[in-house]
Image (cartoon, rainbow, N blue to C red):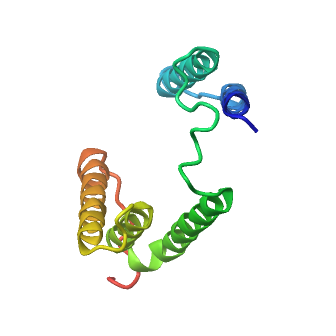
């Protein structure tokens, strides 16, 4: 499958997703739909831009440029490992809490996707990314939005 066909398929699936969101919206208050309507409008604009860029010379991925020396099996393996990390994270979230699983999850995903995963510097960078991501998410949810994140059953 060439890059243009992948772009078109991705745009079609996104458009189907946006239409399904639009059809399912049901608001009980007059101002309840402002944010979802803005979100749906932004998604429609992004899909339109993607479809238009498919036929222009400014396409992001052209045919033959997307392999980067890796076979397709390697990409599937990477996706499976990251999916396994996310699944483990979701299972342990209730028991261990957001902060611990978040740091371990973000660090392990960042380390696995890092090109320098065999060096100490690559691990330190990944750990810093994990701590920074969890810190930002805690600031946004706990203090900005006043939404409590799971503390975990172990720490109760």
Q: Residue at x 37, y 85 (%)?
A: 154
In which image quadrant can residue 66 be found? top right
Query: Residue 112: x, y in percent?
Result: 44, 67
The one nearer the camera, 151 or 122, is 122
User: Where residue 134 sits: x, y (%)?
Assistant: 30, 60
- Decide which of 125, 25 is in the foreground and name it: 125
The quadrant of the image that shows the C terminus is bottom left
| 147 over 20 or under it: above or below | below
Q: Quadrant of the N terminus?
A: top right
Height in image: 134 above or below 124? above
Question: Residue at left 32%, top 51%?
Answer: 141
Query: Left or right: 17 with respect to 35?
Result: right
* The one of 48 and 25 positioned closer to us in this rendering: 48
Q: At 59% across and 28% down in the image, what residue appears?
A: 28
Residue 18 % position (x, y): 65, 28
Residue farthest right in this picture: 1
Name the spot of residue 39 as percent of width and height, x first: 51, 26
Number of numbered discs: 0
Q: Is residue 25 left or right of residue 143?
A: right
């Amino acid at each position: 499958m060439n890059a243009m066909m992948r772009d078109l398929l991705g745009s079609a699936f996104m458009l189907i997703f946006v239409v399904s969101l639009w059809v399912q919206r049901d608001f009980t208050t007059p101002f309840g739909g402002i944010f979802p309507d803005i979100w749906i409008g932004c998604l429609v604009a992004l899909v339109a831009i993607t479809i238009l860029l498919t036929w222009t010379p400014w396409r992001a991925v052209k045919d033959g440029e997307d392999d980067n020396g890796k076979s397709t099996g390697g990409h599937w393996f990477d996706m499976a490992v990251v999916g396994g990390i996310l699944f483990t994270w979701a299972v342990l979230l209730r028991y261990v809490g957001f902060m611990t699983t978040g740091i371990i999850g973000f660090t392990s995903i960042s380390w696995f996707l890092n090109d320098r995963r065999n060096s100490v510097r690559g691990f330190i960078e990944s750990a810093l990314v994990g701590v920074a991501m969890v810190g930002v998410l805690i600031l946004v949810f706990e203090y900005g939005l006043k939404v409590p994140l799971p503390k975990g059953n172990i720490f109760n």
